[in-house]
Amino acid sequence: MTGNGFPTYLKRSRRASVLAPVVSLITACAIVALLASHVHIANVIITTVAATAAACATFARSHYRTQRYVRFAIRARLAKNAEPDYDRLTRQFRSLGKYVQQSAHPSPEIKDALREAEDRMGLRKGSTLALVVPFELILGVVFNCPAAAAMLYAGRHPVILVDDNLQLMLDSPDDFERSYEIVVSVLCHELAHLLAWNTRWSRLVSIGELFVTTAAMASLVAYGLEHNLIFGAIGAIIAAIHLGTEPALADDERSSTPLAIMARIALVAWVPFVVAGVVIGALPLGLTIGVTFLSLGLRFILATIRQREEFYADALAAYALGTSSPLTNFFRTLTSHHPGAWSRMFSSHPPISMRIKNLRKLKI
């Protein structure tokens, strides 16, 4: 671990990590206070409880696939040298047995790269568990580029998820040293997220973000039910359909199913519902603008924080390696595209071109 810039970027990243849950909590309190100024206290309590339950359920549902594969891979790793235990531990996951036997266990090269990355980052060797998990199984979409991700399994166990494509980079005999340096730089980047607390409060931040989004919809529905029962009931139906079918929109395998179609219809119907409510006076302009500003504002702030965390993790990896070249070379291998302004505002990762530009500015 070299360079005076390392502790500087580590402090910045940790400050950003602490800021994220604080902003989420403040925004959640603000949206509840805004609702309390427009509806009866009983409706405020009901709406808050309902939004909290919906946010937790949505978070659990969206992370179920990741947790499932990580849990299964960990069990396979624990039972690697004991065939009877392997059969017992993985009985409930029989359909995934072939996957685990082939790719749950990282190659020796990946293990060596992770140990070197831990040493470079000043961490104790063996403190992080590496799992090879095909990202398309987790994301539900075709994922062809090499990648890795850091997480705290069960909130406390540091895990690095390595995609098959990243491991394949070390299976080619051509220019192995260059590929090895790139993989080490990617793993240093992921370890930087763990070292800088970026994953420590990710569950709380995600639930807070979902709560604010859900509470924004629920606030308008609660006001409508209290002042115009029929109009409020229409909004409740639209919101319930949207919240119940939203996960289908993020899954390519279910993009053409009735659930995904219903999710799109509900999402499109919500805008004219709100506009019509303001026009006919069924929804107050102040509450409508307030909840919209708070929900979109929180998404923008959290996206900005997450992008800064990516920049800081890039810098930490570069300082740990003593050069930014391996990480820059890795970014050049990725498919580059130019997202629209709206996507850039709410994306958790900055554009590749910007990350390369920032790495070049570092004085290592």
Image (tube, grey):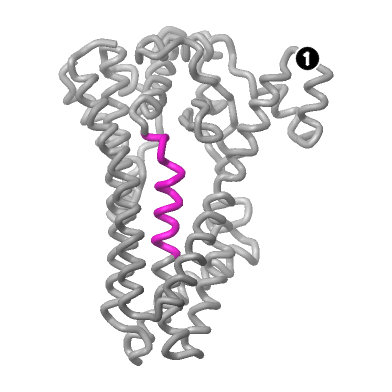
Would you place residue 78 above or below residue 304 in this image? above
Q: Position of residue 13 (x, y in %)?
A: 27, 32
Q: Establish if 347 lies above or below 257.
A: above
Q: Nearer the viewer, residue 85 or 80?
A: 85
Residue ID at (58%, 67%): 261
- In this view of the protein, can residue 29 be seen by the observer? yes
101 vs 36, nearest the viewer: 36
Q: Amino acid at mark 1?
A: Ala
Q: Nearer the viewer, residue 332 or 348?
A: 348
Q: Tell me if residue 212 is in the magenta stretch.
A: yes
Coordinates of residue 86 in the picture (x, y in percent):
78, 22
Q: Which residue is mark 1?
A: 82
Across and down, in percent, residue 241 comes to 57, 71
Which range of residues does the magenta coloring cover? 198-214
Horizontal and vertical percent for residue 194? 40, 27
Q: Residue at x 30, y 14 (%)?
A: 320
Q: For this view, does 75 lie left or right of residue 250?
A: right
**Crowding at label 1, few (<14), some or many (≥20) Cα neighbours within 10 Å?**
few
Residue 246's image quarter? bottom right
Give the quarter of the figure containing the N terminus.
top left
Residue 75, image quadrant? top right
Position of the C terminus, as image quadrant, is: top left
- Residue 351 visible to an observer of this rendering: no
Magenta part, dominant SS: helix
Taking the spot 45% from the left edge, 52% from the top edge, the residue there is: 207
Query: Is residue 336 rendered magenta in the image?
Result: no
